């Protein structure tokens, strides 16, 4: 109790109430980074209401913490049902969605204490359900609050590329990757797709040919792709062969800081070069916008070699899980019965 009181005292002393933002002016929570206006309460595209509306079919909520008359913490979440149990899981195609915190000014230690306190309060405001899983976005490094409230915490990884000039990005790639792209440029042309259904049909067709099960909600995926394209916050690229047939395609979205590589698919006879070519085109598009290119996770062991070939550096992301004993037991039994994917 003394520690919580101390956290509250720090926040009360260092966060004076601020006037509401006037229309057309920088919001009260907005910061600037690299010339871009960044709201710390909406740190990624995945935190934006329109994205969450599309990714959950409108079924999302948000825990919030206020101090000094303004919101200083926000954690969107999505409740689902499974075997009669209520779960909090990541929404469709939403790779990162951690606590969004505006800790304000102060010394590094003061800001750490604020983040710790706000994170704890956000987690305490989550509904008590059978399963809670949160995968944090970049910049969330303090998971002590999760551990203190009974969450198991894990480290996952993604790869990132800083927005260097295109010639620098090309030079820092492995020779093998450059050669693959050169050969692919001779075989394929790259175009944009404006129809999400065409992309998803191609994606699903490739899964069926490979004998894989589609674990995505196609209705929600279509909403996400449509909303992203309508807002010019996403792009679908396709590689076409000499017969103008699509052999590979990917889907990327972006916010003010990063471009995220969300979906990718190829036909069984396309060869590896088509995917590498499309990634390179997406990287160039991201760099010209001055954005970090985030591969949005790893997916599998092969992804590590593929992404590092572009000169990308691995970056850690924290994930947290809290489950009731019976649900955790069911999950552990499921892992024993089937190979576990450690690149979640």
Image (cartoon, rainbow, N blue to C red):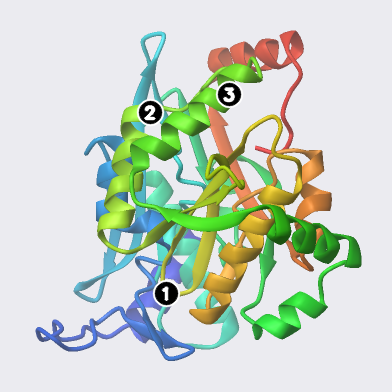
Where does the image place residue 287, in percent across and percent down from the top left? 57, 77
Label 1 close to label 2 by CB (< 8 Å): no
How far apart are the two marked residues, 1 and 2, measured between alpha carbons?
27 Å
User: Which of the numbered marks, if any, corresponds to residue 186?
Assistant: none
Label 1 SS = loop
Determine the image quadrant of residue 140.
Answer: bottom right
Which residue in the structure is indicated by mark 2?
A: 218
Which residue in the structure is indicated by mark 1?
A: 256
How far apart are the two marked residues, 1 and 3, measured between alpha carbons?
32 Å
**Towards the viewer: 125 or 81:** 81
Of labels 1 and 3, earlier in sequence is 3
Mark 3 Cα shell of 10 Å, populated few (<14), some (14-19), many (≥20): some
Q: Nearer the viewer, mark 1 or mark 3?
A: 3
Label 3 SS = helix
Which residue in the structure is indicated by mark 3?
A: 207
Where does the image place residue 311, in percent across and percent down from the top left? 79, 68
**Towards the viewer: 56 or 69:** 56
Of labels 2 and 3, earlier in sequence is 3
Vertical relation: 152 (above or below) 121: above
- Image point (87%, 66%), residue name: 174
């Amino acid at each position: 109790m003394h520690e919580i009181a101390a956290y509250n005292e720090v926040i009360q002393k260092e966060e004076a109430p601020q006037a509401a933002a006037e229309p057309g002016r920088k919001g009260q929570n907005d910061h600037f980074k690299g010339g871009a206006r960044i709201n710390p309460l909406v740190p990624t595209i995945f935190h934006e209401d329109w994205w969450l509306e599309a990714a959950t079919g409108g079924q999302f909520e948000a825990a919030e913490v206020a101090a000094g008359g303004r919101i200083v913490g926000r954690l969107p979440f999505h409740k689902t049902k499974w075997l009669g149990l209520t779960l909090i899981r990541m929404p469709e195609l939403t790779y990162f969605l951690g606590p969004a915190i505006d800790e304000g000014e102060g010394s590094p230690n003061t800001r750490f204490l604020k983040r710790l306190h706000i994170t704890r309060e956000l987690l305490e405001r989550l509904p008590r359900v059978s399963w809670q899983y949160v995968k944090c976005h970049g910049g969330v490094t303090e998971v002590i609050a999760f551990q203190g409230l009974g969450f198991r915490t894990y480290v996952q990884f993604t790869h990132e590329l800083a927005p260097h000039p295109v010639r620098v990005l090309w030079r820092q790639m492995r020779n093998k990757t450059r050669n693959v792209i050169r050969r692919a440029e001779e075989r394929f042309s790259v175009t944009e797709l404006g129809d999400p259904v065409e992309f998803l049909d191609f994606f699903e067709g490739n899964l069926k040919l490979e004998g894989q099960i589609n674990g995505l909600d196609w209705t929600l995926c279509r909403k996400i792709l449509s909303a992203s394209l309508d807002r010019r916050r996403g792009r679908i690229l396709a590689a076409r062969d000499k017969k103008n047939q699509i052999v590979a395609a990917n889907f990327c979205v972006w916010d003010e800081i990063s471009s995220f590589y969300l979906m990718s698919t190829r036909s069984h006879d396309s060869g590896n070069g088509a995917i590498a070519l499309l990634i390179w085109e997406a990287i160039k598009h991201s760099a010209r916008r001055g954005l970090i290119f985030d591969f949005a996770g790893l997916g599998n062991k092969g992804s590590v070699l593929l992404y590092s070939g572009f000169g990308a550096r691995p970056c850690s992301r924290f994930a947290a899980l809290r489950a009731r004993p019976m649900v955790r037991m069911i999950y552990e039994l499921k892992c024993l019965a089937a190979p576990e994917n450690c690149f979640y």
